[in-house]
Amino acid sequence: MPQQPPDFLAHLDGDSVAVAVRTVPAGPAEGAYLDSPGTIDVTVATEVPLGHKIALTDVPAGQDVIEYGVRVGVASADITKGDYVHVHNLRSARWQSSVA
């Protein structure tokens, strides 16, 4: 039986978000890491558009969001595993110093 392509990809094991490789509907979804074998199972809370982020872990408000193994943002609201991560719950780290 052929294996289904992943719904989302995480760059590194330990990232707190992954990128949807297609529009992912709410419900069970399966992804993969680019740096290690195996799959990641997540129940997606709401539809996540192609190219947007899905939370792989809970991230409390004020905590760093990790992608590519680096800090890419700060949670502006509590994020729960499976949430759609975008401007409504994430502030970019691009223009912020690493010291609060």
Image (cartoon, rainbow, N blue to C red):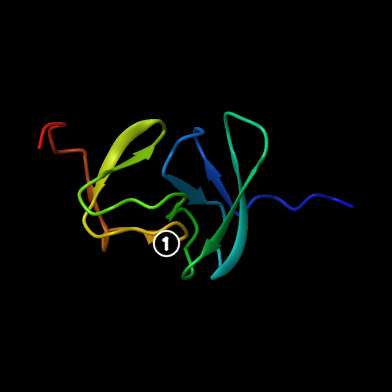
Q: Residue at x 16, y 31 (%)?
A: 98
As drawn, 28 above or below 11 = below
Q: Badge 1 local density, few (<14 within 10 Å), some, or many (20+)? A: many
Depth check, front residue: 21 or 43: 43
Depth check, front residue: 80 or 19: 80
Q: Residue at x 47, y 47 (%)?
A: 18
With 100 as the anchor, is 82 left or right in this view?
A: right
Q: Which residue is mark 1?
A: 83
Q: Could you tell me which secondary element the residue under label 1 belongs to?
A: loop
Three-letter residue code for mark 1 = Asp
As drawn, 21 above or below 98 = below
Q: Report how many numbered discs are placed on residues in the image.
A: 1
Q: Residue furthest left?
A: 100
Depth check, front residue: 31 or 43: 43
User: Could you say where residue 93 lies in the image, as x and y percent from the top left?
Assistant: 21, 40
Q: Residue at x 75, y 53 (%)?
A: 4
Quarter occupied by residue 33: top right
User: Could you say where residue 56 lies in the image, as x and y percent from the top left?
Assistant: 47, 49
Q: Residue at x 50, y 35 (%)?
A: 11
With 97 as the anchor, is 24 left or right in this view?
A: right
In the picture, the quarter occupied by the C terminus is: top left
As drawn, 91 above or below 77 = above
As drawn, 77 above or below 18 = below
User: Could you say where residue 90 lies in the image, as x and y percent from the top left?
Assistant: 26, 54
With 35 as the anchor, is 45 left or right in this view?
A: left
